[in-house]
Amino acid sequence: MNTLNLNGKVAFINGGSRGIGAATARRLASEGATVAIGFSASAIAAEALVAEIEARGGKAVAIKADASDPVALTRAIDSVADRFGRLDILVNSAGVLLLGPVDQFSLDDFDKTVAVNVRGVFVASKAAAAHMMEGGRIINIGSTNAERMPFAGGAVYAMSKSALTGLVKGMARDLGPRGITVNNVSPGPIDTDMNPASTDFASALHGLMALPRHGKADEVAGMVAYLASAESAFVTGADLLIDGGFAA
């Protein structure tokens, strides 16, 4: 690939050890960025990913960062900026998917969803923005379910991803005068541990789509890489669907 020049850039990928986050780490590293892979519990996976990226000639480090802990998350982002002398790109990929009908959904699960999927994005963005110069990029992994929730049990998850739309539009206004862009990438069904392509549920999802298949994490990473690059300098406050027509 190597079509988008990120040489000299430093990226922090929260939730970067698995799935879309890991694919994004690989892609940004292949474009020349130094990537800090934030993880909560998957230390082994994060270190393995660092070794993989370094074996390919890239630069990467693993940083423990719990998206539900604002102090720890801020400290992790500050440490990356201090270590490398800059921070150019933040990718908010950490997320939880807790499903259940609203009359049975626990308040603890509601609070956990909001803490990771919404508050964690705000905390990380605030911490990262403090270190960014002109050309900074904040990119959130949202969900097409913010646009369409065609099955029962997803109300709270959809709400959490819908919240990012408003947050992005507001932050784009706040940070635009500094030359920092803020955007959402909103995938549909993507073949990851969270949503594997080989289940009966996956087959049902394909029937709702214009392209009847799961997407690949690498496809989402390609859109993130575009938003991280100079080519996207005039894109901000956007919610970009990559969902195979799920919401069409």
Image (cartoon, rainbow, N blue to C red):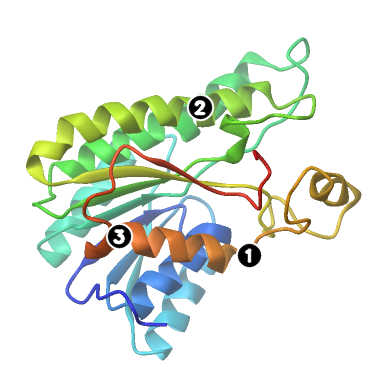
Quarter of the view holding residue 53: bottom left
Q: Earlier in the sequence, mark 2 or mark 3?
A: 2
Q: How would you rate the neighbour count of disc 1 (Cα within 10 Å): few for under 14, some for 14-19, many for 20 or more?
A: some
Residue 189 in the image, given as x and y percentages of width and height: 68, 50
Position in image of residue 78 (x %, y %): 19, 49
Give the answer, above or below, for where 31 lies relative to 165.
Answer: below
Q: State the CA–CA distance, disc 3 to disc 1.
A: 19 Å
- Residue highlighted by disc 3: 228
Label 3: how many Cα within 10 Å (few below 14, some 14–19, many 20+):
many
Q: Secondary structure at mark 1?
A: loop
Q: Decide: is 90 above or below 246.
A: below
Residue that numbered label 1 is attached to: 216
Report the amino acid beneath label 3. Answer: Ala
Tell me what residue is drawn at x 9 percent, y 52 percent.
134
Picture disc at residue 162: 2
Disc 3, SS: helix
